[in-house]
Amino acid sequence: MSDPIRVVLADDHAVVRKGIREFLEESGDIVVVAEAADGDAALTAIRTARPDVAVLDIQMPRRTGIEVTRAVRDERLPVGVLVLTAYDDDPYVQAVLEAGANGYVLKNASSEEIVQAVHTVHEGQMALDPSVARKIVSRWMNAGQTPPQPAEARPTPREMEVLRLVTRGLTNKAIAAQLKISERTVQGHIASLFDKLGVSSRTEAVVRAAQLGWVSLERMTNDE
């Protein structure tokens, strides 16, 4: 069995931290190595515990999650940053992503979705709440930033199945189980999709595919 994902959890509400810690650790492959109730303590914990992923709230005393993220990136600390917040306002989203966070998930997400986001960030991918991803796509499309249709690069029927499941936030393992194929085969389909879309992450793939009309924006928020 591989080593568990080591997490620093920062939120200024003890009850919230307790709940998040419980369902993260119930997943069986995540361990919370430190907790923090403010931004300064969060940054100290990240520096000393050297976690794989830092799960940060935005609004915290002393330093916000945005400021902690910026400090982590300025110091080149080798940690993925997942912002877990109740705010989905555009200024927050933009500030978080510009600071260098690897993920932005809302607190009303299910425990499974938050666990998945931690895994996604740990794997070096971007994890965006579907409603946040939808806003980003809509903003880009309204700004006229729609990329040209790739020539002769339409996905195969199987790649479309994989793409739809990626859009729903499923892991490679979950996609493999649903489609009854191996994880290696899933990885191959995703690599092919990345190449056809000209992207390097799952989130970019979903955003670009939505711009091209390959997947539905509504599906990003309403799919089961």
Image (spheres, rainbow, N blue to C red):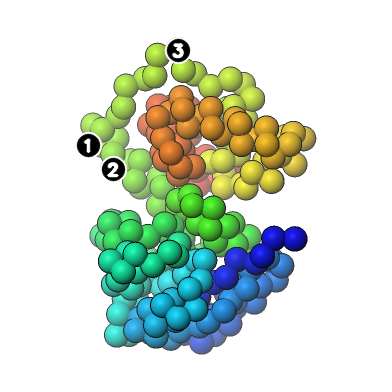
Outermost residue on the top side: it is 152
Residue 84 higher or lower than 15, as above or below? above
In 3D space, how far apart are the residues under numbered discs 2 and 3 (Cα atoms)? 27 Å
The residue type indicated by label 2 comes to Arg
What percent of the width, then of the height, locates residue 213?
43, 27
What percent of the width, then of the height, locates residue 110?
59, 62
Mark 2 lies on a secondary structure that is: helix
Q: Are marks 2 and 3 in contact (CB under 8 Å)?
A: no
What percent of the width, then of the height, locates residue 12?
42, 84
Count of all numbered marks drawn on residues in the image: 3
The residue type indicated by label 1 comes to Ala
Mark 1 lies on a secondary structure that is: loop
| Residue at 40%, 45% in the rendered image | 134
In 3D space, how far apart are the residues under numbered discs 3 and 1 (Cα atoms)? 26 Å
Which is nearer the N-term, disc 3 or disc 1? 1
User: Between tags 2 and 3, which lies in front?
Assistant: 3
Query: What numbered label is drawn on residue 139?
Result: 2
Please indicate whether residue 169 sits to the left or right of residue 212 in the image.
right
Q: Are marks 2 and 1 in contact (CB under 8 Å)?
A: yes
Q: Are marks 3 and 1 in contact (CB under 8 Å)?
A: no
Looking at the picture, tell me which residue is in the foreground, 93 or 4.
Answer: 4
Residue placed under numbered mark 1 in the picture: 143
Please indicate whether residue 55 sits to the left or right of residue 5 in the image.
left
Please indicate whether residue 120 sits to the left or right of residue 182 in the image.
left
| Residue at 66%, 72% in the rendered image | 25
In 3D space, how far apart are the residues under numbered discs 2 and 1 (Cα atoms)? 6 Å
What percent of the width, then of the height, locates residue 86?
42, 68
Query: What numbered label is drawn on residue 152?
Result: 3
Residue 177 higher or lower than 107, as above or below? above
| Residue at 29%, 85% in the rendered image | 62
